[in-house]
Image: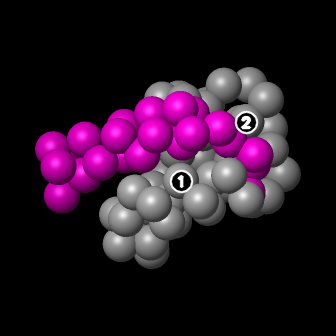
Amino acid sequence: MGEKSVTDLAGVGEVLGKRLETAGFDKAYVVLGQFLVLKKDKELFQEWMKETCSANSKQSADCYQCLKDWCDEFL
């Protein structure tokens, strides 16, 4: 994951990326940290994305799956 931008996450485009950056989530690994804090819970993560950057259910589901797949592979 390294220093990748938050927009490199699935489901996060330019608009959501800007909203996340404004909220302090400027890198993919920072969003991963929040994902882990929420104990990889899909419902909690999707609710967090909705509240934090107004993500819709598809965007938040795509981002959740991306992070889950990364964790399954590397953690």
Distance between the alpha carbons at the discs numbered 1 and 2: 13 Å
Q: Is residue 17 above or below residue 72?
A: above
Around disc 2, counting alpha carbons within 10 Å, would you say few (fewer than 14), some (14 to 19), or many (20 or more)? Answer: some
Residue drawn at point x = 68 percent, y = 41 percent: 55
Front one among 35 and 46: 46
Q: Main secondary structure of the magenta part?
A: helix
Q: Which residues are magenta?
A: 52-75
In the figure, is residue 59 to the left or right of 43? Answer: right
Question: What residue would you read off at disc 2?
Answer: 16
Residue drawn at point x = 74 percent, y = 25 percent: 14
Question: What residue would you read off at disc 1?
Answer: 46
Q: Secondary structure at mark 1?
A: helix
Around disc 1, counting alpha carbons within 10 Å, would you say few (fewer than 14), some (14 to 19), or many (20 or more)? Answer: many
Residue drawn at point x = 73 percent, y = 57 percent: 52
Amino acid at pointer 1: Gln
Where does the N terminus fall, quadrant-wise? Answer: top left
Which of disc 2 and disc 1 is earlier in sequence?
2
Amino acid at pointer 2: Leu
Image coordinates of residue 28 in percent, x first then y, are 52, 45
Can you see residue 52? Answer: yes
Frontmost of labels 1 and 2 is 1
Image coordinates of residue 38 in percent, x first then y, are 44, 72
Quarter of image, res 31: bottom right
Where does the C terminus fall, quadrant-wise? Answer: bottom left
Q: Is residue 26 above or below residue 11?
A: below
Quarter of image, res 7: top right
Let me know if residue 50 is in the magenta part: no
Image coordinates of residue 74 in percent, x first then y, are 18, 49
> Farthest residue in the right direction?
22
Q: Secondary structure at mark 2?
A: helix
Image coordinates of residue 60 in percent, x first then y, are 54, 42
